Amino acid sequence: MFFLRFLDVSEERSSYVCRCKRGMFFLRLSMLFESHFEKRQDFLASKIAQNRPSRTDFCRLCSATADSFWFPGEIIMADKTEEQTAFLRKSFLDPKVGMVGTTQTYDQLAGQFDQVVAGYEYRAHHRVVDRLVSLVGDRNRAEMKIMDLGCGTGLVGEVLYAAGFTQLDGLEPSQGMLDVARSKGIYRELFCAYVALNDEKLSIADNSYDALTIAGSMGVNMVPPEGIYEMHRLVKPGGYVINVVREETVTEIEGFKDKLEPMMQQMEADGKWKLLSRLVFPDYLVDKPGVVFTHQVC
């Protein structure tokens, strides 16, 4: 089994998923890999009933009894192997895979990405736009040039466009994700490129944008801490860099926890930009808090 062994009553009773937030998070995460592995969807009550848990069984994540589990008619069977567990860890968590390997995974998942994220209680894309709106006030949003860095399938771009920021460019290393973003018709130009890969500069001129947004794209195998140098370079003096990350990225993740904020602070000491705010919010993803960093370029 893939994730259900961690949240269900036993490996033998693998047909049941707890409704708790963590349980549903792992269920949705499993669904993300549907394009890689044939996910068995079986809603036949007669088959599921063979493994019906007793009322005394409990979820290993939240300790809820079986009354809180998904039962026949609702359950999505999600059988996964140890090989697939290793695939998850390797693709998104193992630094040895690198940005290129992770990009290949996103290419394959692009067609399902929006659907899966919609069930994550994901709020980072709204938070980054809310912050930009609060900064610009009555300024004509349609005249502002915005870079949506790590744009993925265009989740941030959709919110930006709906808020009146219509001069949007996006940048994303996954061509599959960019194809989905392009289909939404909200971007002027889309760039397929990595940020801070081998210290290479992007083929975009200095001071090109009034603001740059990035939500959820800094982390292991994604945009490294050094990416903030390019973010700063792309934005005009007086413009904004708004960066949303999971809080654990800056408090727990190796390569970020002792590096990202010190680098930001050094740039401020060097007169490159100034920190306007560091806001923590509770609902980045499921029950994971996030941080919104807002810098103004000097």
Image: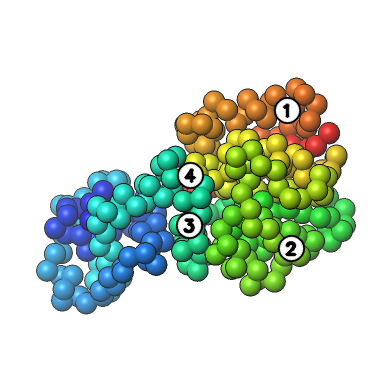
Q: Earlier in the sequence, mark 1 or mark 2?
A: 2
Q: Amino acid at mark 1?
A: Met
Instruction: Report how far apart the C-alphas of labels 1 and 4 lie in the structure.
Output: 26 Å
Q: Secondary structure at mark 4?
A: helix
From the viewer's perspective, is 240 left or right of 198?
right
Q: CA distance from mark 1 to mark 2?
A: 29 Å
Residue 232, position as x, y percentages in the image: 75, 39
| Disc 4 crowd, CA 10 A, few/some/many (<14, 14-19, 20+) | some
**Residue positioned 39% across, 67% down in the render:** 35
**Could you give the CA–CA distance between mark 3 and mark 2, rounded to whole angstroms?**
22 Å
Q: In the rendered structure, which amino acid carries the disc numbered 4?
A: Gly
Amino acid on which disc 2 is placed: Glu
- Residue 14: quadrant of the picture: bottom left
Q: Which residue is mark 1?
A: 267
How many numbered discs? 4
The disc placed on residue 104 is: 3
Q: Dot 2 lies on which element?
A: strand
Q: Which mark is residue 189?
A: 2
Please tell me which residue lies in front, 281 or 100.
100
